[in-house]
């Protein structure tokens, strides 16, 4: 028989254990610590980053009128700034200096053209020769007409003689004084005299017609030559170049006393009574441009308004040139080519939700934003945008008026759904 271990066993009595006060305090402290550490442990577990509030830009969502516009630059140009050109080749004498005020019609430059003056003298001589030839021809025609009239008068005298001879022959033939042959001869003589007279009369009439024709021909030659001379004299008068408008002289485009070719621009006259703005608009906005669009301009710190009155049909260096009127030129002292900053208004919307522009619009494709919540936390929300201005962006969904959005760059925490903001 195998002996058991009963002889080695010891009976232990079950007594109720009591926790001392110190142990209870430790347990309570441990529970409080765990409770306070739970948010931190939860954030660590969820990978919620902390962001310094000083690095963020926060803006409220507001409701109001939004203007879609673009900022451009340009210069002030005179609406009327005609250029003056040399009409002939010659030596130029500039009489008005750049910046000098001139009146309309005032002499500002003069050309000297010896070739034109020589040609004028030649044409004047030709005109005098034609006038002399015309006078000589008129005298010759009158002399020829006088000779023909003399012949007609002689034929008339011969006709009168033949008529009297015919009358005498009839009387004599009736008294049987002359023969029938002599009577018939007188009849033939009268017929010949009448025919000669009619021929002489027609020659005189034809001479008068020829005289009229030749006179007109010579007059036309004289008139033609006079027109040639008048044109040369007009060109000579154009050598004195006058200001077409009241204004100031712009830049000299040729040197004083230089010999210039015909049709060379020599200077400009700037009309200071009316200015326009010449603006360069990025090609991106070319399709949005239109006549009549409002333009707000700033010149020398003064705000003035206008509207687009002309648009260039071509694009140069990725820019479209437009011209805008300036409504109140008296509000600021404008100068030619003075720099202008402007905003072109394309569209206006009233009563829209909007927030200030910021780098956030490009961080997440403009589809998400971080909305500020309670306890200095911000949560990523989906948004949709509409038109934009230089300062604001329209928000069409995802937000309400009065909410706060982070509008600075999201690069450091763009993958997080929630962030903590520390100050």
Image (tube, grey):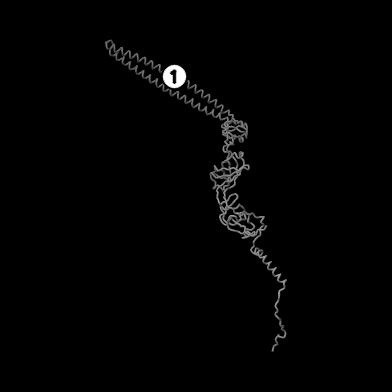
Q: Nearer the viewer, residue 292 or 181?
A: 292
x 47%, y 24%: residue: 219
Work out whether 176 lies above or below 216.
above
Q: Residues within 10 Å of mark 1 (few under 14, many from 20)?
A: some
Residue 271 falls left or right of residue 175: right
Q: Nearer the viewer, residue 417 or 116?
A: 417
Spot occupied by residue 315 in the image (x, y as percentages of width and height) = 56, 45
Spot occupied by residue 234 in the image (x, y as percentages of width and height) = 54, 29
Q: Secondary structure at mark 1?
A: helix
The answer to which quarter of the image holds residue 54 is bottom right
* Count of numbered labels shown in the rendering: 1
| Quadrant, the N terminus | bottom right
Query: What residue would you read off at disc 1?
Result: 142
Spot occupied by residue 345 in the image (x, y as percentages of width and height) = 56, 47
Q: Nearer the viewer, residue 317 or 289?
A: 289
| Quadrant, the C terminus | bottom right
Q: Residue furthest bottom?
A: 1
The answer to which quarter of the image holds residue 329 is top right
Spot occupied by residue 73 in the image (x, y as percentages of width and height) = 60, 44
The answer to which quarter of the image holds residue 32 is bottom right
Q: Nearer the viewer, residue 407 or 85?
A: 407
Work out whether 55 lies above or below 186.
below
């Amino acid at each position: 028989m195998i002996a058991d271990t009963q002889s080695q066993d010891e009976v232990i009595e079950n007594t109720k254990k009591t926790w001392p006060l110190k142990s209870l305090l430790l347990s309570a402290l441990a529970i409080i610590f765990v409770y306070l550490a739970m948010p931190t442990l939860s954030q660590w577990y969820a990978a919620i980053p902390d962001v310094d509030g000083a690095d963020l830009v926060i803006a409220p969502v507001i409701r109001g009128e939004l203007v879609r516009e673009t900022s451009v630059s340009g210069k002030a140009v005179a609406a009327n700034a005609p250029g003056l050109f040399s009409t002939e080749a010659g030596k130029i004498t500039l009489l008005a200096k750049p910046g000098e005020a001139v009146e309309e019609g005032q002499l500002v430059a003069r050309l000297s053209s010896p070739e034109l003056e020589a040609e004028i003298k030649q044409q004047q001589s030709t005109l005098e020769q034609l006038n002399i030839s015309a006078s000589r021809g008129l005298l010759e025609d009158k002399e020829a007409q006088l000779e023909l009239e003399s012949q007609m008068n002689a034929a008339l005298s011969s006709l009168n003689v033949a008529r009297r001879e015919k009358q005498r022959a009839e009387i004599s033939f009736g008294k049987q004084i002359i023969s029938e042959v002599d009577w018939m001869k007188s009849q033939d003589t009268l017929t010949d005299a009448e025919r000669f007279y009619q021929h002489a009369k027609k020659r005189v009439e034809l001479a008068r017609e020829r005289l009229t024709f030749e006179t007109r021909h010579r007059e036309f030659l004289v008139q033609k030559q006079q027109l040639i001379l008048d044109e040369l004299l007009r060109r000579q008068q154009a050598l004195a170049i006058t200001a077409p408008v009241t204004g100031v002289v712009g830049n000299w485009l040729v040197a004083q006393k230089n010999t210039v070719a015909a049709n060379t621009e020599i200077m400009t006259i700037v009309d200071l009574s009316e200015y326009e703005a010449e603006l360069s608009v990025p090609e991106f906005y070319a399709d949005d441009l239109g006549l009549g669009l409002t333009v707000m301009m700033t010149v020398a710190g003064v705000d003035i308004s206008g509207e687009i009155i002309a648009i260039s049909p071509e694009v140069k260096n990725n820019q479209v040139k437009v011209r805008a009127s300036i409504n109140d030129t008296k509000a600021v002292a404008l100068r030619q080519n003075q720099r202008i900053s402007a905003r072109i208004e394309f569209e206006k919307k009233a009563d829209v939700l909007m927030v200030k522009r910021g780098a956030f619009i490009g961080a997440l494709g403009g589809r998400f934003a971080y909305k500020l919540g309670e306890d200095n936390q911000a949560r990523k929300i989906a948004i949709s945008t509409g038109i934009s201005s230089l300062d604001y962006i329209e928000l069409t969904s995802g937000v309400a008026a009065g909410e706060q959005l982070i509008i600075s760059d999201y690069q450091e925490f763009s993958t997080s759904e929630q962030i903590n903001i520390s100050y």
